[in-house]
Image: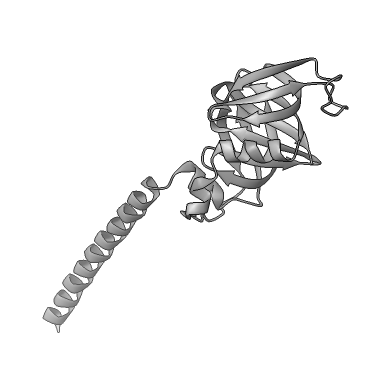
Amino acid sequence: MRWESLFADLESQLNAVRARERTVEIQEMVRIERSQLRLWDYLAGQTGAEITLDLLSGQRLRGVLVHVGANWLSLLEGHAEYLVLAPGIRSIEVAGERAAVVDQTAVRRRLSQGAALRSLVRNRARVTVWAVDGAALGTGTLDHAGADHLRLARHPADGYRRSAEVRSVALLPFASISVLRHEG
């Protein structure tokens, strides 16, 4: 009887060691999997959630995450929609522990910041543009989005792009732009 207790105890200890080893192995596999996750893939799983952005300029934006592309996102705050480019973001805060959904589809990978900006051009959206350092770059209508820059026809925020209303045209390199705001 005594031998049976000893063997049962040894078997129990062996099972406990195996369980701990399995737990450590699973934890390491999870860490490896998470190390492959890109920020934009994680954010794709947060679409529809409320997030807070702290920008390098010191601005803070809070709203519902609407779209996520390659190195950009759009955020809805009331009636205003913000297109935020990656170089201007200091940190992103998401509410709670929402599961990440990694979307590696070709469509999402093609949604470059240029594509997002060209959609604003196509819609003739009136925008206000801010630089990475927080300086206002201007208010007006986007005339076109090039490979690495925007052309902004500056005019009063409450007006439309008409030749008589355009005060100047600004060429804005993507690298200098942090945020574009337009009323939805």
Any part of residue 162 in sight: yes
The residue nearer to you, when weighing 16 against 181, is 181
**What percent of the width, then of the height, locates residue 55?**
61, 27
**What percent of the width, then of the height, locates residue 125?**
76, 35
State which quarter of the image contains the C terminus.
top right
Residue at point 70%, 40% (across, down): 122
For this orientation, the residue located farthest to the front is: 163
- Occupied quadrant, residue 112: top right
Q: Is residue 5 left or right of residue 120?
A: left
State which quarter of the image contains the N terminus.
bottom left
For this orientation, the residue located farthest to the left is: 3
The residue nearer to you, when weighing 18 against 69, is 69
**What percent of the width, then of the height, locates residue 9?**
20, 72
Residue at point 36%, 54% (across, down): 30
User: How many discs mark residues in the rendered view?
Assistant: 0
Q: How is the image coloured?
A: one colour
Residue at point 64%, 37% (across, down): 118
Question: On screen, 112 above or below 130?
Answer: below
Any part of residue 134 in sight: no
- Occupied quadrant, residue 2: bottom left
Residue at point 74%, 40% (across, down): 123
Q: Is residue 183 left or right of residue 51?
A: right
The residue nearer to you, when weighing 38 against 167, is 167
